């Protein structure tokens, strides 16, 4: 007699798979990645290629070492490599990228049991490790080399040059808008520049032209953080594909914007909402890092709490911390709270809610 | 117009086009029938015939074996060839009466009873061996006997037929809607309910139209148009969709004054009271890409799957999986000698390409199972807990509230077998509860 397949119900399935999810996220990053290559040239391309290759190799090596399922081509290691390279400046030494990718896959993921069991975002673990090991390389920015586009950093530097004492100009090394802002604030605190000069800098940074440059990506910065617009397009694709939900990106971005508006300026409600969300890695973090399926909360309410707290951390780190940017640490710190957030946000099942009038 | 529905759920391709246009065909009964004594939830019926006994269509061959149990009747006239243990869809063997059909089709129906008095309806339904025909096969007379402190004000006829592929309820409602309405009327009388609803999914607009026309002058009955969404036909979800009443956890529809009956059950009850015909045959959809000519048929209970599939043109060369019921909650079988029973709404055959053969993958905590669970549970958790045999924890995570609709597994990118683990956990917890109760 013919042998039939047997299984527990259900017997039909959606066409979704881990592979599809991961490659879709990679695809969503593509516009921003291509823009980085156009903007920074071969440096950016080599960074991505090296990080991705190293991540995939590391995946194979650690899977062998820990006897885990080998999943080279499901796109998850590829994604870790790509994401990590996008959080780093162009022109990172190749050896750093390789070390970072191995650390991300090995200590960010494999030691916990592989995909699905890692509490922290592996790409950010990789970046954090590099930032701790070679802090200078991680914040050494190159001017964009390709395209005769106006650069906000040049504009900001120009404003600074024209308004502040000559001896302070030398200390303005930052090529990113957030860096320039942070330095202007600290120079003001040190008394090198006065309030009016600070206003001139913040004014230049949050001017219409500057915001538009930020939004479109005509700026310096890490590979993946320069164009908020292209990241937004990728994010919308992920929302459309139902790979992520709106909760984390919307709450994260709004929290950062609102808190920066209230506390990010010289006085209360003096900061720039748009500058704070378009500058730095907010969009990359909001759509691609904080939403990492494995390391974010399971329930909608939990997602909103997590995103809100991460947003608070970003503003605190930017305004009061030692780094110009706080996206990476805000997400890593909140990753640690995911189990406890999940525990307290589990909804009541259907039937435990109060009965609607009979 | 806003369609009624519940929260969450999934939208699988409905695949009903395969059999939707096929009129219900009455099939001449096979030569040999295997009628199991357990075609319902509860105690099996006690067999009341012996080898060599003569039976007619409608003769009582099994008598109810407890309160939650019901009668079984012969679907044909002929001779009892043997009483054996025969495999069923659940993998266990049950006592089965093998009847040799003499082809004369002599009838021994019950005396038709006027369903006028409340007192005659419930015993009549028990005598006729009626059970829920949507698949759960809960004895209907039990559902219609609520305790005195739980008055029923509403009957809902479940015409959602939310399982993909199946079209038996659709055809039955399309071809004999008046029987469904007559059945609803009897149910309402049985429990003195004031209001009756017929719930129809929006993919069966024609049926909705027919019922609207039939019920246009009545204010005690109404037809509700439901969003096409799975599991729209699950009792608690259906009640919520139509009445916005929430059946409490661990409770029954009667706790909110409702009894839900399948449309096929309603039609069977009408036939019982108008013709005295007990439940011994039913409409079955035989469908899927694994059969050559999908269709809707009236089969006697006891007809084998083999016989049923032959009526649909037989298996295709690439037929690979046979499912009794729908693709979401049905049971796969590997023995085609298993018989059609009172709850067999469909027989689905999937092909080699349609069968999932890959091993399941890791959980990537995407939360999709949570997003679709109509009971607001956290399905992903049950595999984690089941693997570690943490049954008490599974109970704390409300595994007992799971309705096993399968939406979580359907939607899971990793195809993790949540339902398999949930069923095992429920069985363990039930066993534990029984042990504790016995102490």
Image (cartoon, coloured by chain):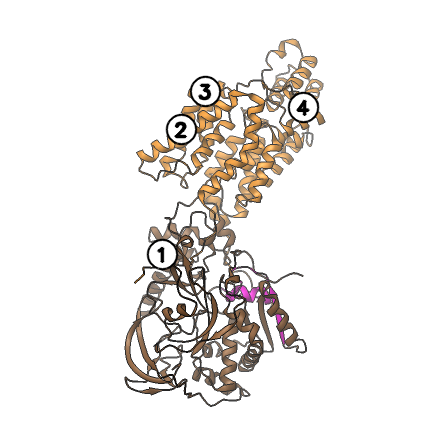
Q: CA distance from mark 2 to mark 4?
A: 36 Å
Residue A36 in sight here: yes
Q: Dot 1: within a 10 Å radius of its alpha carbon, few (fewer than 14), some, or many (20 or more) residues?
A: many
Q: Secondary structure at mark 3?
A: loop
Q: CA distance from mark 1 to mark 2?
A: 37 Å
Q: Which residue is mark 1?
A: B391
Check the rendered structure and report the hue given to chain B. brown
Q: Which residue is mark 2?
A: A103
Tell me residue B254's x, y (percent).
51, 72
Residue B245 part of the magenta segment: yes
Q: Secondary structure at mark 2?
A: helix
Tell me the subunit letter for badge 2: A
Q: Which mark is residue A205?
A: 4
Q: Secondary structure at mark 1?
A: helix
Q: Which residue is mark 3?
A: A134
Tell me the subunit letter for badge 1: B
Tell me residue A242's x, y (percent).
54, 46
Q: Earlier in the sequence, mark 2 or mark 3?
A: 2
| Region rendered in magenta | B221-248
Residue under disc 4 on the same chain as residue under disc 1: no
Q: Secondary structure at mark 4?
A: helix
Q: Dot 3: within a 10 Å radius of its alpha carbon, few (fewer than 14), some, or many (20 or more) residues?
A: few
Q: Dot 2: within a 10 Å radius of its alpha carbon, few (fewer than 14), some, or many (20 or more) residues?
A: many
Q: Examine the rendered structure and indicate whether residue B412 appears above or below residue B50.
A: above
Q: Pointer 2 and pointer 3: residues touching (CB < 8 Å)?
A: no
């Amino acid at each position: 007699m013919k042998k039939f397949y047997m299984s527990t119900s259900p017997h039909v399935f959606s066409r979704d798979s881990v592979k599809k999810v991961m490659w879709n996220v990679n695809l969503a990053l593509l516009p921003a990645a291509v823009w980085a290559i156009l903007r920074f040239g071969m440096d950016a391309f080599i960074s991505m290629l090296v990080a991705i290759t190293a991540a995939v190799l590391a995946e194979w090596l650690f899977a062998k070492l820990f006897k885990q399922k080998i999943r080279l081509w499901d796109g998850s290691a590829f994604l870790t490599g790509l994401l990590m390279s996008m959080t780093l400046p162009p022109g990172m030494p190749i050896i750093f990228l390789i070390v970072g990718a191995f650390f991300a896959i090995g200590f960010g993921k494999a030691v916990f049991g592989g995909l699905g069991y890692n509490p922290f975002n592996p790409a950010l673990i990789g970046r954090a490790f590099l930032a701790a090991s070679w802090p200078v390389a991680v914040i050494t920015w190159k001017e964009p080399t390709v395209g005769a586009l106006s650069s906000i950093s040049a504009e900001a530097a120009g404003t600074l040059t024209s308004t502040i004492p000559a001896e302070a100009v030398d200390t303005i090394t930052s090529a990113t808008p957030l860096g320039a802002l942070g330095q202007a604030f600290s120079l003001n605190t040190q008394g090198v520049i006065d309030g009016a000069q600070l206003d001139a800098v913040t004014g230049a940074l949050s001017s219409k032209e500057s915001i538009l440059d930020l939004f479109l990506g005509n700026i310096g910065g890490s590979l993946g953080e320069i164009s908020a617009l292209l990241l937004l397009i990728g994010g919308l694709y992920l929302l459309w594909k139902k790979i992520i939900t709106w909760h984390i990106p919307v709450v994260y971005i709004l929290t950062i914007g609102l808190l920066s508006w209230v506390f990010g300026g010289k006085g209360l409600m003096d900061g720039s909402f748009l500058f704070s969300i378009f500058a730095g890695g907010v969009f990359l973090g909001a759509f691609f890092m904080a939403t990492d399926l494995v390391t974010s909360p399971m329930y909608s309410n939990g997602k909103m709490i997590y995103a809100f707290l991460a947003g608070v951390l970003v503003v605190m780190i930017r305004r009061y911390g030692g780094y110009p940017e706080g996206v990476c640490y805000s997400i890593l710190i909140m990753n640690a709270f995911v189990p406890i957030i999940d525990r307290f946000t589990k909804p009541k099942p259907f039937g435990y809610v109060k009965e609607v009038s009979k | 117009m806003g369609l009624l529905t519940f929260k969450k759920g999934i939208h699988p391709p409905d695949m009903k086009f395969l059999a939707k246009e096929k009129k219900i065909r009455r099939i001449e009964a096979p030569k040999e029938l295997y009628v199991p004594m357990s075609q319902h939830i509860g105690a099996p019926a006690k067999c009341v015939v012996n080898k060599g006994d003569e039976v007619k269509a409608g003769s009582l061959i099994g008598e109810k074996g407890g309160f939650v149990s019901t009668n079984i009747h012969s679907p044909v006239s002929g001779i009892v060839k043997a009483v054996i243990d025969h495999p069923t869809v659940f993998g266990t063997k049950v006592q089965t009466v093998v009847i040799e059909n003499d082809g004369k089709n002599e009838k021994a129906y019950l005396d038709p009873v006027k369903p006028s008095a409340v007192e005659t309806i419930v015993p009549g339904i028990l005598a006729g061996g009626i059970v829920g025909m949507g698949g759960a096969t809960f004895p209907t007379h039990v559902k219609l006997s609520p305790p005195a402190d739980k008055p029923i004000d509403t009957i809902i006829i479940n015409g959602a037929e939310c399982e993909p592929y199946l079209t038996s309820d659709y055809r039955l409602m399309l071809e004999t809607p008046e029987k469904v309405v007559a059945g609803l009327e009897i149910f309402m009388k049985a429990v003195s309910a004031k209001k009756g609803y017929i719930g129809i999914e929006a993919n069966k607009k024609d049926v909705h139209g027919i019922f609207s026309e039939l019920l246009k002058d009545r204010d005690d009955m109404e037809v509700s148009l439901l969003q096409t969404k799975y599991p729209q036909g699950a009792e608690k979800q259906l009640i919520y969709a139509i009445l916005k009443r929430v059946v409490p956890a661990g409770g029954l529809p009667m706790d909110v004054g409702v009894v839900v009956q399948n449309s096929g059950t309603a039609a069977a009850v009408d036939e019982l009271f108008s013709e005295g015909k007990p439940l011994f045959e039913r409409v079955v959809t035989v469908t899927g890409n694994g059969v050559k000519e999908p269709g809707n048929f009236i089969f006697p209970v006891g007809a084998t799957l083999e016989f049923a599939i032959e009526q649909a043109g037989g298996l295709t060369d690439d037929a690979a999986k046979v499912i009794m019921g729908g693709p979401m909650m049905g049971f796969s079988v590997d023995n085609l000698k298993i018989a059609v029973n009172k709850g067999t709404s469909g027989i689905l055959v999937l092909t080699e390409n349609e069968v999932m053969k890959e091993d399941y993958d890791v959980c990537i905590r995407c939360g999709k199972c949570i997003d679709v669970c109509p009971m607001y549970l956290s399905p992903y958790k049950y595999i984690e807990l089941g693997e570690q045999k943490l049954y008490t924890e599974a109970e704390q995570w409300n595994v007992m509230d799971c309705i096993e609709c399968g939406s979580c597994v359907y939607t899971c990118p990793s195809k993790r077998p949540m339902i398999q683990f949930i069923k095992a956990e429920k069985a363990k917890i039930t066993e534990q509860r029984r042990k504790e109760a016995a102490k």
